[in-house]
Image (cartoon, grey):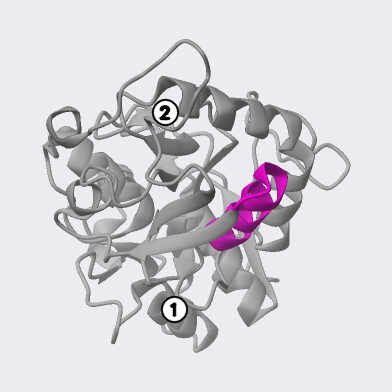
Amino acid sequence: MEAGRHRRWLFSLCVMVASCAIGDVARAQTTDSGDLSFELVDPKVLRVCADPRNLPFSNEKGEGIENKLAELFADKLQKKLDYVFFPQATGFVRMTLGAHRCDVIMGFPQGDDLVQGTNPYYRTSYALVAKAGSGLEDVDTLEDPKLKGKHVGIVAGTPPATNMAIAGLMGDAKPYPLMIDTRYDNSAQAMIDDLAAGKIDAGVLWGPMAGYYAKKAGSLHVTPLVKETTGPKLVYRIGMGVRGADQNWKRQLNKLIQENQGEINKILLDFGVPLLDENDRPLGAETAKKAP
């Protein structure tokens, strides 16, 4: 179940399936010629596996980070773009990529064995969101004494909840549900609303969510939590996911990532994603061409 928990932590989604048997259902055959006709559902179409209601990552209207990345890749490949939408809950990988209905999941944590991962295209972390002028803007670890006695919002069951427990912060914390129906609920938005209303002093969210919702709200400060010394590490690399058999397709995606890192980073920064280099330093517009 570890791989399922890992993805659930990162994206604050419902429980992922623990085993999806991609190798058993994939009809693809790898070749050394670079021919993708045996690997892809339709070589003329970029078919993306996505959640229909999962901003800031994807939605049916094409408004998410991964929608914009898919548009960029489709343009570079000179392919038509199409989606197979399925809620990122139990069975997502099995019912989309594993069933050969689509060919790539645009965002997947490195090291998760549910799929074969590409090279990572960004590196980010969980982050603390606080109001400007709160005195918490420079807090970059949950061990910081400034958080003692503060009401901190946390999505239950995510890695930083463990760090908060170790730091003795859970007694004053406000938990938000991990498993929700995204048609009706949004834990990240609820946390940001509570922060704006003064019901909590700060909130801890997965970096892309923290950046996206803080940018929408305005007057909020996002600080990546990069200095944890106890509990889980809160920094992760994100790549794309393909079937285990699709070696040529993976190589092509890796080439696209390498050749278009600057444009990829611009999309991520436009959505407020707190990008980090390998030394946990923030990547801004001037340095965003560096690979993660």
Q: Residue at x 49, y 38 (%)?
A: 238
What residue lies at 41% left-to-right and 76% top-to-bottom? Answer: 191
Circle 1: element type: helix
Camera-side residue of 142 and 159: 159
Residue 190 is situated, as x and y percent measured from the top left of the image, at 39, 81
Q: Earlier in the sequence, mark 1 or mark 2?
A: 1
Tally of numbered tags: 2
Q: Main secondary structure of the magenta part?
A: helix
Occupied quadrant, residue 4: top left
Looking at the rendered image, the quarter that the C terminus falls into is top right
Picture coordinates of residue 24, whole percent (x, y): 12, 30
Mark closer to the observer (1, 2): 1
Note whether 217 is above or below 143 in the view shown. below
Is 154 colored magenta in this rendering? no
Q: Nearer the viewer, residue 152 or 125?
A: 125
Q: Is residue 120 above or below residue 283?
A: above
Q: Amino acid at mark 2?
A: Thr
Q: CA distance from mark 1 to mark 2?
A: 29 Å
Are there few (<14), some (14-19), or many (20+) residues within 10 Å of tag 2?
Answer: few
Please say whether residue 75 is one of the residues in the magenta stretch: yes
- Residue on which disc 1 sits: 189
Residue 292 in view here? no
Q: Which residue lies under the disc numbered 2? A: 229
Is 77 placed above or below 198 here? above
Looking at the image, which residue is at 66% across and 33% down? 256
Q: Position of residue 193 (x, y in %)?
A: 47, 84
Region of the chain picked out in magenta, as a range:
65-79
| Identity, as a three-letter code, of the amino acid under mark 1 | Gln
Q: Residues within 10 Å of mark 1 (few under 14, many from 20)?
A: some
Q: Residue at x 18, y 47 (%)?
A: 94
